[in-house]
Amino acid sequence: MSPLPNYRPRKLSLGHLEAEILEIIWDLETATVKQIHDRILSDPERELAYASVTTVLHRLTQKGWLKYSKKGRAFSWHPLVSREQARAIQAYEQLQQFLAISNPDIVAAFADSLDIASLEQLDAITSRLQAIRRQREET
């Protein structure tokens, strides 16, 4: 997983269409409204107004997920964080929300219910944290 980036979008919550359009932009790396609209309408079961794509792109820009550039009359949108960085940010936020419960009984019950694979993951995380801390101490 990507390390937690210094930059974070202003608003992390995304609607279904916002998330879908962001995925398309990550796939294309940069995209115009037409490219996104065409990609969505490639599914014959879908209907979506061109203006709706534009509205969602502006919303994602306001939330801090995208930036745009203009060449002539055409606008292109680019992600401000990578897909991996977004996953790291969202995982961090979920962990913070879980820890904010501040109830040791709930956390203990959760930890007690972990399966063997989860425990192995926790061991791997512990090893990684120890390595990161050793690196910090050396520098």
Image (tube, grey):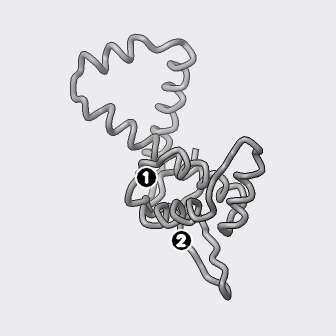
Which numbered dot is residue 45?
none
**At 50% from the left edge and 41% from the top edge, which residue is drawn?**
131
Judging depth in this view, the residue of 27 and 113 nearest the camera is: 27
Judging depth in this view, the residue of 114 and 43 nearest the camera is: 43
Q: Which residue is the site of mark 2? A: 67
Give the image location of residue 29, x and y in percent.
69, 63
Give the image location of residue 77, x and y in percent.
61, 69
Q: Nearer the viewer, mark 1 or mark 2?
A: 2
Say which amino acid is labelled 2. Lys
Q: Secondary structure at mark 1?
A: helix
Q: Secondary structure at mark 2?
A: strand
Q: In what quadrant of the picture does the C terminus appear?
A: bottom left
Q: Which residue is the site of mark 1? A: 136
Give the image location of residue 61, x and y in percent.
48, 66
Judging depth in this view, the residue of 48 and 71 nearest the camera is: 48
**At 25% from the left edge and 29% from the top edge, which residue is drawn?**
101
Say which amino acid is labelled 1. Arg
Indicate the quadrant where residue 102 lies: top left
Left or right relative to 106: residue 56: right
